[in-house]
Amino acid sequence: MSDPVIHVEGLGKRYAIGERARYFALRDVLTNALKAPARLFGLNRLSGNHSRREQMWALRDVSFDIYEGEVVGLIGRNGAGKTTLLKILSRVTRPTTGFAEVDGRLGSLLEVGTGFHPELTGRENVFLSGAILGMSKRGMDRKFDEMVAFAEVEKFIDTPLKYYSTGMQMRLAFAVAAHLEPEILLVDEVLAVGDASFQKKCLGKMGDVSRQGRTIIFVSHNMTALRSLCSRALWLNGGKIVETGSAGDVIDHYLQKNTVANLESLWESELAAPGDHQVRLRAVRVIPEAGSSDQITVHTPLRIEFAYWNYLPGAVLNVSIFLNNLEEICVFNIVSDFAPRPVGLIRHTVRIPGDFLNTGSYYVNLLIVKDTSIVLLRQDNVVAFEVVEGKVLGNWYGRVPGVVRPKLSWLSEAIENDGLASTRSHMT
Amino acid sequence: MTILPNVPREDKLRIGPPQGWLELNLREMADYRELLYFFVWRDIKIRYKQTAIGAAWAVLQPLLTMVVFSLFFGKLAKMPSLGLPYPVFYYTALLPWTYFATALQNASNVVVDQQRVITKVYFPRLILPASAVISGLVDFAVGFLLYIPLQLYYGIIPTRAMLLLPVFLLLAVLTALGVGLWLSALNAVYRDVRYVVPFLVQFWMLASPVAYPSSVVPARWRVVYGLNPMTGVIESFRWSLTGQGRPPDLQLLASASMVVLMLLAGLVYFQRMETTIADVV
């Protein structure tokens, strides 16, 4: 086998917690210096400086090889280290340990529209963004018309970007990125944005690129797209590689593991459970009703059970749940019936029908409410589950657009008189 | 030991932890010169698009300052002016000074202003402060065009010394870059810098011969005074444009050496920060 185009060995990246979140003010440094003057004189090694700021390995001991022409999907939950890995490979940040070797021109698409400026026209932004992403002026001149046609913004190309709709901006941004033509392309979850036809176009373009024999590393939560585009997948969790292998296998294992791991939150001991002297949470469970329990498809009906200890005799209690998807959009908020509850364990169960939720990851946030308005307990992400595609219809491997995907009844028939014509004739 | 970017095999890029003292890679900078050009181009475009009277600002700022200085320092305080008319005396200093002050401020803020791009795409970060000091040259050019008629109006004929002007301008550019490198990297970590720079610029102007000729500084302090790079730049500007004042001498040498020193220190510091800038900005 030839040399890998990407060779990664023992890669690690450590962040001091909070480092990324905010900048320091000089004030902090001065106060720290006053609190611990020893640090100023480089004695920090002696005084155990590492305990002062908590550190976190976003990536640890990651090693893998990627060969020419492979399309590799990077999967894992939020915070698993996927973006950090892409950032190291694209040289935005440097690793703390280990190294990566990249053989070939590498382009990265960590964000749609990097470097766009609202005051500049579409044309100017194409050139600016292209240059930032590493395209040569000559290459852009050559491909300019193609990019504009792909984005479908010909008419507005000399209009300042601030007058574009979000969709137009997005299309233009992706058009630039899609025409980068690097030998290795890194793509981070750009498909999560935009409308359905845009997503379809992006996926199609990615398919084209991979058929041209270029190497792609692709981060997405869209398992259906990953399954059909990728030959191999790499599963990260907590900054480490859990599994690499054929995309189908790794995705299956990932979905199984994640589904099972988050379907239930259980607190055995009343003391350790979230809550206080009024109520404490006992358990939250997601129970797939039909078929095999290892995967929840769009057709599977679900029950979600909530159990808690009530310490307030006769209090009027109900639960209120928020079902959020990965984009943090609240799919729905529903409340249970409310009534006076006795002291002891209380359970509420809600049923979500099959053919209602769309594919994707869902999280449940829970409130326990007294007298229909006083929040006694709030617990976010009590359970999470993934809804996967049932069976793929045709060659459409994108996600069916929409927050929900209900199965609604249709009535289709041939008719002789449409009724409207007669109404209109009455009016004239 | 070479770390970045070209290890033996051609094209193979090795990405490892930051090491060593200085990883300055001029070849890489050359590869990215097109991006430098685009950043400069964008700076200029945006500046002139967002302002109502566009390029006029480049002229107005030194022009109005010149009027105020001529009136107060000149007519009222009777500051010595090397025998030059006050407007010429002040404008010749304000040309490089205005450029320097603007370039320094822009360079200090550029890393923070471009943090979105920095955290998403790789390019040599040095391009950012470099583009900030280069794009300021357009304003300088506009301001300079106005100077020529002013000089002719007062009957001052340019001498051959004017041919040296680009050299002095380069000194101003490198001073702004050297200090800007420090400040932009510091600004990424400590946002206080943004508020410190205006003060710095103000104090720096008082310590430079903008409002007065350096001849008011006692002779034995002249070389020390020259350690402020802008002293050499401004004195030389006056001399090369009008033929009056100090021709290049020991004071300029002191200034030029300081520029080189500051630039080298700035490069080292910036490069050290560069590896972590995306993590902290």
Image: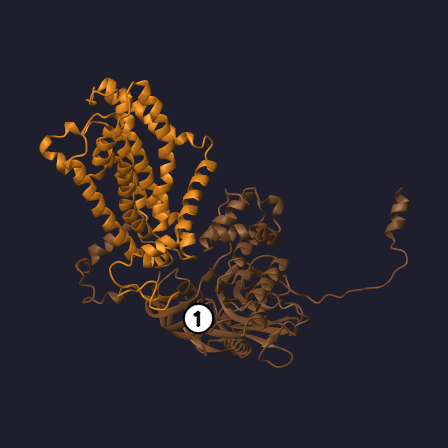
Chain colours: A brown, B orange
Establish if A254 lies above or below B182: below
Mark 1: which amino acid? Answer: Val
Q: Mark 1 points at which residue?
A: A5
In terms of secondary structure, where does tag 1 sit? loop
| In-image side of A291 versus B197 (left or right) | right
Residue nearest the viewer, comparing A283 with B189: B189
Would residue B101 be found to the left or right of residue A284 on screen?
left
In the rendered view, tell whether residue B193 sits above or below residue A280.
Answer: above
- Bin the neighbour count of mark 1 within 10 Å (Cα to Cα): few under 14, some 14-19, many 20 and up: many
Q: In which quarter of the image is the N terminus of chain B?
A: bottom left
**Vertical comparison of A390 with B128: above or below:** below
Quadrant showing the C terminus of chain B? bottom left
Count of picture labels: 1
- Chain where mark 1 sits: A
Find residue A318 and report its horizontal and vertical position in percent: 57, 65
The residue at the far front in this view is B160
Give the x, y percent position of residue B4.
32, 63
Left or right of residue B273, residue A252 in this image = right
Q: Position of residue B43 (x, y in %)?
A: 42, 42
Asked if one can make out residue A276 in the rendered structure from this viewpoint, the answer is: no
